[in-house]
Image (cartoon, rainbow, N blue to C red):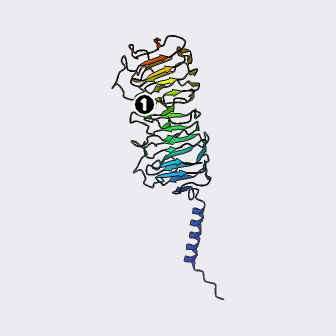
Amino acid sequence: MKQPKFYAAPLIILLIGIALSSCFDSDPTRDSVVTISSNITTPVTWESGKTYIVDKDNLYIDAELTIEPGATIKIMNEGNIILRTSGNIIANGTNATPIVFTSIKDDNHGNDDNQDGDNTVPAAGDWGCINLNGSQNSTFSYCQFLYGGRDNTNPATVDVSSEAKATFNNCTFAYNSGALLNNMYVGALNASNADKNTIITNCRFFGNKVPMTINAEMSIDNSNSFSNEGLSNKCNGIFVSGSNVSSDISWLEDEVAFVVTAPDLEIGMNTRLTLGNNVVIKFAEHSSMTVMSGEGCLVNHDGPGVFFTSLKDDEHKGDTNGDGNATIPSVADWTGIFLDNWKSTKGFADWDNILYNDPQATAK
């Protein structure tokens, strides 16, 4: 009886093909990279463990984008993420599984997603910004924002613009731009035009050119950090934009100085600005502060470690203007604190903790 013939070579090829197919099907990274090239117009969720590559100059969001813990978002070609109409971002990571917004060149998060080996390395300004553009409900917790902020256009990495209201808690801003642009400071987190109820707590800022700018009517507690293992920021301070405070606020941060950049910051009638101990307020050139209801509304102005001084003063809270030894403070760097109390004589304060102001400033 003839034995059946076996065609070994085709069988082996078939078995190898099946084995290879099985390997690919079980590859956990095969479907983990998603390219985003269209605007978001309906609610969508970006999933944990996946890398989303934004391959679009301006990705517009007109609906709610939910980002799960552990997702990585890489932005290509100096691109931006811009909210419109009813757009919001809900990005709540965890301490163990943060959400990362970073450069396409960043191989330490996700993989070598631009597939160029070691030919490129990430740097500040690799991508543009996340512009919240009036959004009222965006939330970011345990998020990392890395290598953003396009220079000379919009150096912010997250721009809380158009009176947007947002919450940032336990977020990290590192190796971003921020800049002095057209005589205005713009932070990696730029909340200079934000709603006054925007919350920034427990966040870390390091390796940025300018870490944070805020609206003058925002309260800031003492929970944020402005260095990491000895690395701080080039202009290491909280830069304050705006010229009017009309509701009670508190400035409690004592690691870095607050910097008043407006020609005159007015604390309105019966409005209190409360300072924490060891708080330092620095003033840009020729800036001043007016307290409409007198010194009683600048609460704790004489507290331990509280100083009002020049932006050029490196002895109090360090080199806030980031110029090393190029400038030194001198008398009349800034104007002073005007106490406009309707019940008594008007005039500039002459407290011992006011430094480098203009001693010849005249009453208004």
Q: Residue furthest left?
A: 326
Residue 110, how many percent across, how many down? 52, 50
Q: Is residue 258 left or right of residue 21?
A: left
Residue 90, how many percent across, how many down? 61, 45
> Taking the image as drawn, is residue 7 in sight?
yes
Residue 292, how many percent across, how many down? 52, 19
Vertical position of residue 234 compared to residue 106: above or below: above
Q: Which residue is mark 1?
A: 235
Q: How dense is the environment of label 1, judged by Cα within 10 Å: few (below 14), some, or many (20 and up)?
A: many
> Taking the image as drawn, is residue 317 in sight?
no
Q: Quadrant of residue 181?
A: top left
| The N terminus sits in image quarter | bottom right
Q: Residue shown at 54%/45% (left/top)?
A: 100
Residue 207, how many percent across, how many down? 45, 35
| The C terminus sits in image quarter | top left
Q: Residue shown at 53%/43% (left/top)?
A: 133
Viewer-side residue, 337 vs 10: 337
